[in-house]
DNA sequence: GATGAATGAGAATTCATTCAT
DNA sequence: GATGAATGAATTCTCATTCAT
């Protein structure tokens, strides 16, 4: 039993190493550089070994996204459980979303940035998870509307619009356009300013 | 001279045909399907011919982006020339930006969406053009602030934040997440709602 | 002893299961689909287990053929034991041969059809068994000659010629060229006609 | 013009070299050893070059068979043109068929021997050509029947039966079972004996 | 006795790019 | 100026086989 357990743990560990390696490759050189051999080299296993853990390159990409988005959903649910007041709850949610995007830029772009090539687009499952996050946003807005804090309106439309704003912000933060030698605002300044604009926009 | 001129014109024409073909391939099947052979087939020239006009695949990608963003700058300058009132001028600018993104989704994503592979990322030049658009936005905001229409603040930071919002909106519109069986707002509804949120957010 | 015997029986049983699984794979999808993994899956053992019973893929292929051809020899000997008149004995033999080919088309082709790849061609042993069948044929012809039923001649040469005729017939039956939209004769018609031609050809 | 012609000739020459190399590989080591790289090595070109001449491995296999069977048809038609008497015509045809099989054993087995794996079986076209040869045989038999030389009967059924006999003979000759240390008849003896048996079988 | 994990060799195929003509 | 021919490097994926447990 101990043996079986250890084996299962080891197997899981390698699975994770593969996914991590894939993510790192993406971050370093973009999607194209995520090759089976590249991953294999990085984890110092043979390329064939990867096929014992994932049927496909597609399956790897998919697993990365699903794994990650499940984390996002969990975090948002954790926020739900804190019993916050409507506005605080809304704010916590959007900050969580942005933070998540910054922590997982590869997965984020893969699912929402449209950078996944057609051949690897079994992304429906992870996209659905992303949609759950969006619904979470909608519920938060509805609560604030009910509390008279936000202007009335169709909450889902607002949610999509706000999601767009967050998405844009996240993209900017990820791509760090500061590298283009502009007097770029710091990440914190930018986040604070954006969140402020979003809330002011929605306010009653 | 007449001959030389005609030659130069012809040369330029083919250059443009190459770029157009590449863009069409982008639009049809995503970045991966843009191959030298594919472009060549489309314009009914040989693949080698393309190398007489562009040193690299990278150079083609670059040229596409630069060409397109020059168009954006031109349009924004055309708006400048209309002599609009500050708020109208600002609104015209952001709507122009979003429309541009929707018209040129691939160039847009290539430059701003982070979907350009490492091998094709001499994108600095086009990125700088994108920054010009951003500065244009900053000037528009500053004018509205000066007119007392927008809340005071560092206009460039606001510009970046708004740019993010526009960027997110554009990405959503481009990727058309409506396909995921949600009661998705129409493009018009979403644009109107987003523009409204942006202006309310900035308002004095 | 009882235990050892049971073990031996079990070991033999698995050996047979492996061979059967391999044959079934042959029959389903042709030679290429016979992979160690495929066999393993079919018998619900691990691939490594097969190596406890056979050194090689080659050995499996070989064993299949030897096993099968031993069956052919047995059947021919059974016919010998029936005490038939010379001509009936000859006829029973050739019909048995054709029936055998149709029952075991892949083993047949593997050994006689030249479809065995170089890597799996330790087929000498099974080929020798095939030769035994041929000798059987020669003896049958000799008997008919001795009885004045067949024209005189070197019986072994005749045997090879007849064997060729049977082989061709069998190949046609196996490959079922009827699929090529011709008004193809039925299997029975074809067999009867061929046997008739063979006997008429040999007749005194 | 001279240049274009020479180029065309050179192109054709390489195409033929590719096909020849493929045939030689088959003959040496069986179908499995016919790999793109194997062919490439043999002709001392790069593997990619082959793809300039053939889209697929399948296309190569197909081309080999079609090319060869066209030759068979041509030869049979040449025999038709000789104005031979019915029996001589029939005999010339079957000897031509056997000779052809011996000259092109690879193609022969590929099309009629069932040794082509499922993945390379766009062989319909060449099979149809094979069927033309069969029809030729049928017409020859019908002529001999009409001349009262052969026993009456459905000529196409006889043709298939005879084709089977020829096919078996050819296979034996190709595979040269003499290697199995038997007192094997010489090729000539075997052919003569078989042709004799065939004719005696059909005779009125 | 049985097996899961791992691998190396090798398969087909694609593509950007070069160069002689 | 244009191109056909050629290629090397890379990619995904499969499979027989080994070995520690």
Image: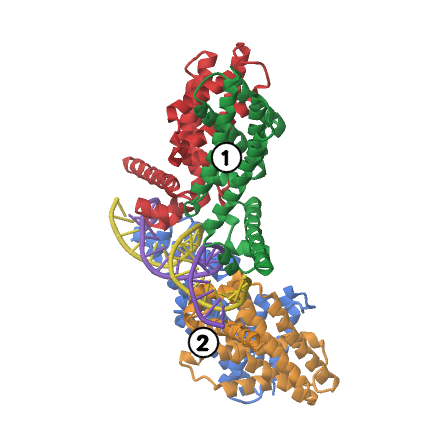
Chain colours: A red, B green, C blue, D orange, E purple, F yellow
Q: Which residue in the structure is indicated by mark 2?
A: C131
Q: Nearer the viewer, residue D118 or B89?
A: B89
Q: Nearer the viewer, residue B164 or A65?
A: B164
Q: CA distance from mark 2 to mark 1?
A: 61 Å
Residue A183 sits above or below residue C48 on the image: above
Residue appearing at x 52%, y 39% in the figure: B69
Q: What residue is shown at x 47% (from left), y 67% (from top)?
A: C110
Residue position for label 1: A125
How many numbered marks does the figure carry? 2
Q: Residues within 10 Å of mark 1 (few under 14, many from 20)?
A: some
Q: Residue furthest top?
A: A148
CB atoms at circles 2 and 1 under 8 Å apart? no
In the image, is B56 to the left or to the right of D83?
left
Classify residue A15 by image quadrant. Answer: top left
For image coordinates 51% across by 27% down, the residue present is: A164
Label 2: few (<14), some (14–19) or many (≥20) C-alpha neighbours in 10 Å: some
Q: For residue D112, which quarter of the picture? A: bottom right
Give the left or right position of residue A138, taking residue F16 as reference.
right
Toward the viewer: C55 or F18?
F18
Q: The disc numbered 2 marks a residue on which chain? A: C
Letter of the chain that mark 1 sits on in the rendering: A
The answer, for residue B49, to whether it is visible in the render is: yes
Q: Secondary structure at mark 1?
A: helix
């Amino acid at each position: 039993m101990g043996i079986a357990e250890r084996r299962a743990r080891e197997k899981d560990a390698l699975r994770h190493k593969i996914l991590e390696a894939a993510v790192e490759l993406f971050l370093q050189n973009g999607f194209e550089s995520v090759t089976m051999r590249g991953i294999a080299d990085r984890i110092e296993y043979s390329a064939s070994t990867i096929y014992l853990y994932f049927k496909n390159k597609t399956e790897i990409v998919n697993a990365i996204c699903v794994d990650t988005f499940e984390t996002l959903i969990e975090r948002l649910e954790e926020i739900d459980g804190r019993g916050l007041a409507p506005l605080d709850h809304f704010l916590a949610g959007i900050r969580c979303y942005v933070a998540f995007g910054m922590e997982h830029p590869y997965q984020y772009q893969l699912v929402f940035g449209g950078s996944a090539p057609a051949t690897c687009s079994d992304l429906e499952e992870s996209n659905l998870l992303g949609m759950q996050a969006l619904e979470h946003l909608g519920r938060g807005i509805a609560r604030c509307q009910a509390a008279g804090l936000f202007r009335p309106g169709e909450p889902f439309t607002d949610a999509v619009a706000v999601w767009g704003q967050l998405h844009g912000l996240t993209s900017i933060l990820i791509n760090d356009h500061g590298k283009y030698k502009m007097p770029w605002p710091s990440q914190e300044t930018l986040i604070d300013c954006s969140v402020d604009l979003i809330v002011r926009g929605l306010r009653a």
